[in-house]
Amino acid sequence: MRMVSFRIRKDGTCRAPPVGAPWSETGGTTSTMAASKQTERTPTPIKPKATGAAGGSKFVANQPATGTGSHHVQPRRAERRPEMIRQKREERTKSYERQRQIRQWTRIGGAAIAALIVAGIAWTVFSYVTREAPPGEEVSSSAPPAQHIARNQDGSAPPHEEYTSQPPTSGPHYGNEVEGPGVYKESREPERFVHSLEHGYVILQYNCECPETIALLERFANPATGYPTAVITQPWANMETEVALTAWNYIDRMSAAEATPERIRTFIDEHINKGPERIASQVSTIREWREDDDATRPWDGQ
């Protein structure tokens, strides 16, 4: 008995081979299998797209353009690959060069800043070591700078700590009494002029029969011929030298012959307005006087 095979179609129907058709051992007719294989192997032809309304053919992808039309055909990716590689290589080279320059300038800037810092420290140390000491001798005081005292009921000064120098340069003083600038022919109370020293005054004291030196000191202290403020001249008997220039915590002792205009001026300019309690109006008055070219200078003579 012979077995008959049916071919199943894609739509679900089946069909028996025609009568008399050669039979294949694989379960189908030879013509059917050959047709099937031919159908599987033969590719479906690509139909060209319809023409446009104007009759011209439309552009078909992956087909070379013919003629001199205005359509620009993009190069294939394989054709663009060498150019893309070259561009990326150039971008990497430029990026590396920028980073290299940034690192180079960063190192240069850091080295320059470090050099400036070292130079500044060296200059500060050098200036401190080689600086000239302020004129006069520094006098320390065990009393607090603002140790204010009040008079007794009879007007006398109350007992207080002794001053560490004569004339005094700091120490106890009246809190509400202060001497003003100018020339004094008699000695003032130390509790009053020490308060003036606290305000940045400079006091020129003498203890000698030396009219020329006294006139020179008075010329510096007189607001009409010398400094307009913050300088006092007075006699002071309780001292070992003939002349003593005092400021807050500083004293310069000398003989009458050593009291030259240059030495007096140097001491005043170094210490004036440098007390613990500075007066703004006093500072501005001295500054304006120094800037006035027409002002009288006590070191220029009579």
Image (tube, helix red, strand yellow):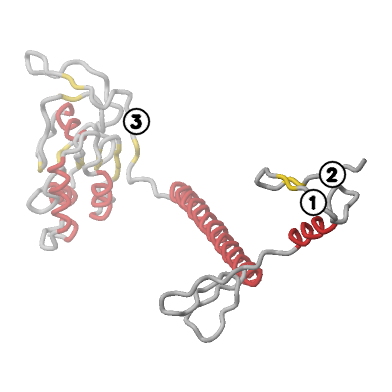
Q: Nearer the viewer, residue 259 or 226?
A: 226
- Residue 230, horizontal then vertical, whole percent: 15, 42
Name the quadrant of the N terminus: top right
Instruction: State the SS at label 3.
Output: loop
User: Horizontally, is 121 left or right of 39 in the view?
Assistant: left
Instruction: State the SS at label 2.
Output: loop
User: Horizontally, is 212 left or right of 135 in the view?
Assistant: left
Given the current orientation, which residue lies at the most extreme front position? 19
Instruction: State the SS at label 1.
Output: loop
Residue type for callout 2 = Val
Given the current orientation, which residue lies at the most extreme top position? 153
Mark 3 or 2: the one toward you: 2
Q: Are marks 3 and 2 in contact (CB under 8 Å)?
A: no
- Kindly report the distance in space between the C-alpha atoms of the residues bearing marks 1 and 2: 8 Å
User: Horizontally, is 33 left or right of 289 in the view?
Assistant: right
Quadrant in which residue 198 is drawn: top left
Q: Are marks 1 and 2 in contact (CB under 8 Å)?
A: yes
Q: Is residue 145 above or below residue 25?
A: above
- Residue 216, horizontal then vertical, whole percent: 17, 51
Q: Which residue is mark 2?
A: 4
Q: Is residue 207 above or below residue 73?
A: above
Instruction: State which tag comes first along the sequence, 1 or 2.
Output: 2
- Kindly report the distance in space between the C-alpha atoms of the residues bearing marks 3 and 2: 135 Å
Q: Residue at x 39, y 49 (%)?
A: 132
Q: Which residue is mark 3?
A: 140
Quadrant in which residue 137 is drawn: top left
